[in-house]
Image: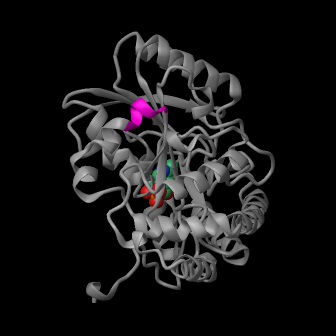
Amino acid sequence: MAIIQTTQLNIPDHIIDFGAGQPSLSLLPREIMAQAAAHRLAQNDAALLQYGAEAGDGYFRIALAQFLSQGYKMSVDPEHLFITLAASQALDAICKYYTQPGDTIFIEEPTYFLALFIFQDYPLRIVSIPVDEQGLMIEALVEALGKYCPAFLYTIPTFHNPSATTLPAERREALARLSEEYSFLIVADEVYHLLDYTAPPPPPLASYDRRGTVLSVGSFSKILAPGLRLGWIQAQPPLLKPFINSGLVQSGGGLNPFTSGLVRSALELGLQQEYLGQLKAVYGHRAAALSQALRQHLPGATFAEPEGGFFIWLRLPEGADTDTLLARAKAYDVAFKPGSSFSQQGGVKNYLRLSFAYYEAEKLIEGVERLTRVIQK
Ligand SMILES: Cc1ncc(COP(=O)(O)O)c(C=O)c1O
């Protein structure tokens, strides 16, 4: 049966899995992509099917830079963009071209658990820096910099996965200055930056970069569709050279040129902008419904009201073990990601991550009711 699967995740209908950090199928923009594809193919431009320009198609990079300049509220130069196969491949390429075997890298504790898998594909020493309710703790970073010389720090500054925190402007500034002082790169995973539901976050880390120490990673996975496998690295041009000069790109040309062409139309026709507005309304509504249900049913649990992104990071009383809880939750047809998944050291055990991206409000509320029964047991 496995051969006929088409999607990565296949959740049986009777289960509500809060672990699903991806959009519902019903939200995916089939009509927008049909319109964008029809528009691009009507141009009768065979170059769309040719090996692509190394950094990514120039017209696409111009359209992307304009879109980002508007969304990021900073001027984005198309020459500062390298097109990737979404954020995951960007992270893999950064490990490949910016580390040597045995190098140390810094990550956050907790962090996006699948990025950990990418880093573990390389022989790297991984050191965790704690996150508090405002994101990466600068004092802990300074302390770690006294002991190690990391090749890079991997951080999720905005609407963090899993902790939902957003790094304030002063910490962004401090982080950028530290990267200059201690000569390490900042790999800022900014895939949720444009998904704000209450107030816009501070500008992405690239806007704090003075000396070419920031690689800012973005993706269409969260704002258009994961199946496009399309994203970018934003950085000063010298930092993009290893990607452009790589054997992969020299041999195969720029990454994903056909899809870039279709998404170029979605950008130029204003379809992406319109869709982003719809997504923000839908996710904002789901986030509010999930928070309200948690406050009502689980008053003993604490969390920060989500201001963007996909997640609520729920804290249970000290001593709770969400791995054990997950094992018990199966009997109640509910699931989530336990805190330990996001930790290098198996810590944050009394936390769990709930995604509000995958289900509509009614299912989220039903899921909280099931979860409440598990926790109260
Ligand atoms: C923080 C973070 N980075 C990267 C990714 C993967 O993104 P992409 O689909 O662009 O590879 C995700 C997806 O869940 C994510 O949450």
Q: Is residue 239 magenta?
A: yes
Indicate left or right for 230 with 76 as reference: left
Which residue appears at 25% of the width and 26% of the height? 103
Which residue appears at 66% of the width and 77% of the height? 363
Residue 76: name its quadrant.
top right
Q: Is residue 225 magenta?
A: no
In depth, the one of 54 and 129 nearer the eye is 54
Percent of width and height locating residue 89: 36, 53
Percent of width and height locating residue 368: 66, 67
Which residue appears at 54% of the width and 40% of the height? 156
Indicate left or right for 105 with 228 as reference: left
In depth, the one of 184 and 13 nearer the eye is 184
Placement of the C terminus among the 4 image quadrants:
bottom right
In depth, the one of 121 and 328 nearer the eye is 121
Placement of the N terminus among the 4 image quadrants:
bottom left
In depth, the one of 354 and 212 nearer the eye is 212
Q: Is residue 120 visible?
A: yes
Percent of width and height locating residue 252: 26, 59
Please, what is the dominant secondary structure of the magenta stretch?
helix
Indicate left or right for 60 with 185 as reference: right
Judge whether 55 appears above or below 11 on screen.
Answer: above
Residue 97: name its quadrant.
top left
Percent of width and height locating residue 40: 54, 76
Residue 209: name its quadrant.
top right
Q: How is the image coloured?
A: one colour
Judge whether 24 appears above or below 55 on screen.
Answer: below
Which residue appears at 43% of the width and 13% of the height? 182
Judge whether 91 appears above or below 207 on screen.
Answer: below
Q: Which residues are magenta?
A: 236-240
